[in-house]
Amino acid sequence: MKYSRFKEITDRYSQLSVAVIGDYCLDRYLEIDPSRTELSIETGLEVFNVNNVRSQPGGCGTVLSNLIALGCANLFPVGFAGKDGEGYELLMALKADKSVNLKYFLQTSERRTFTYCKPLVMNDSGVPRELNRFDSKNWIKTPESVQMELAASITQLAHQVDVIVLLGQVDHAETGVLCGRVLDALCQVRTDNPELLIIADSRSGFAHFPNVCLKMNRGEFLSMINASEELLMPELMKQITILSDQRDQGVFVSLSEDGIAGAFPGVDAAHVAGLPCGDEIDVVGAGDAVMANLALALASNASTVEAMRIAMVAASIVVRQLGTTGVASRNDIAPLLKGLDE
């Protein structure tokens, strides 16, 4: 892709308003100094001494961070955090950038803040070793009152934004943001605004989602079309085209090292190869970077292939950022697009 075309697409990003709706969490990193390991006098167990604590928005927050890095200046997160210490950290992290408007983000005592706590042993090699995570999640259904407040926010926002990004991060049904009343509100938004770009990614599937543009990984796609085995690329592309035509919406399938494939109704699926990433990679956040770049590029009149090329470069940058949930900026992406002309 020529730089002039990339600039033409990305210069529009600052003019877009984006609602990012779904499961926000706190990514908390505990950096452990292995040279200071001790034994507990009380238990005799090994003690890990934490040298540094880093916190940043995760889940939907990672998509948001990528949108900020890409220069989007009008961002509306819609989700919830608990009235707990992790919730305070998450809110502080979200409000750190002036492009983020927290008017529609809910802090409630009826939920705990979804948290991934990641202990990292910091080695001299520069490649941190992650130990078992400590996760904090909600295990009961999202209260009706919380759902209603979020649904009302979505209804208010629908006419203020150019793009809606949906991200379902929870594994346990009905415990996150994208459930019940919220999905009902999104279905109404879809009906009332048929031309509005809404793009969704959900690790628990799309069974109750409105009919929107979908982004998923290969396994999720094969499950969605009830395929019993892996598909070779020509058949995979054919099935993506069929699903897009059936749904009358865009469909994008991330293929890990094989890149990404996608289609819009009436057009055969296209494929963009992945970029070499080196030996040491960390895939955390790569899918969110793809999501953010697809959303902004498509909303800025990029073609399907152009949007996927930009998204693949962003993913290749993120996976090389070890021990953190990475992002890719426009300045990061531009040099790597050289030589990838169609």
Image (spheres, grey):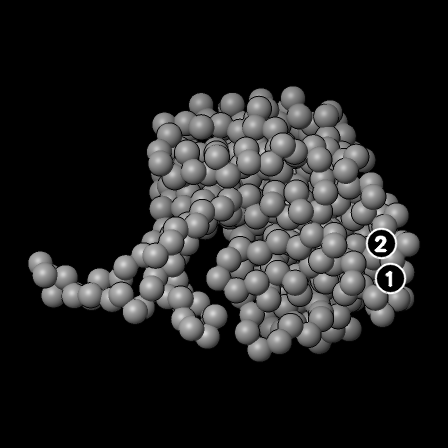
Of the pair 300 and 212, the residue shown nearer to us? 300
Q: Is residue 288 above or below residue 111?
A: below
Q: CA distance from mark 1 to mark 2?
A: 7 Å
* Residue type pointed to by label 1: Met
Instruction: Give residue 125's mark.
Output: none
* Residue 36 locus on image (x, y percent): 27, 65
* Mark sitting earlier along the chain (1/2): 1
* Residue type pointed to by label 2: Phe
**Dot 2 alpha-carbon crowd within 10 angstroms: few under 14, some 14 to 19, many 20 or more:** some
Q: Residue at x 69, y 52 (%)?
A: 329
- The residue pinned by badge 2 equals 6
Element class at badge 1: loop
**Dot 1 alpha-carbon crowd within 10 angstroms: few under 14, some 14 to 19, many 20 or more:** some
In contact (CB < 8 Å): disc 1 and disc 2: yes
Quadrant where the C terminus lies? Answer: bottom right
Instruction: Quadrant for residue 238, please give it.
Output: bottom right
- The residue pinned by badge 1 equals 1
Element class at badge 2: helix
* Residue 146 locus on image (x, y percent): 46, 27
For the question of whether residue 95 can be seen, the reply is yes
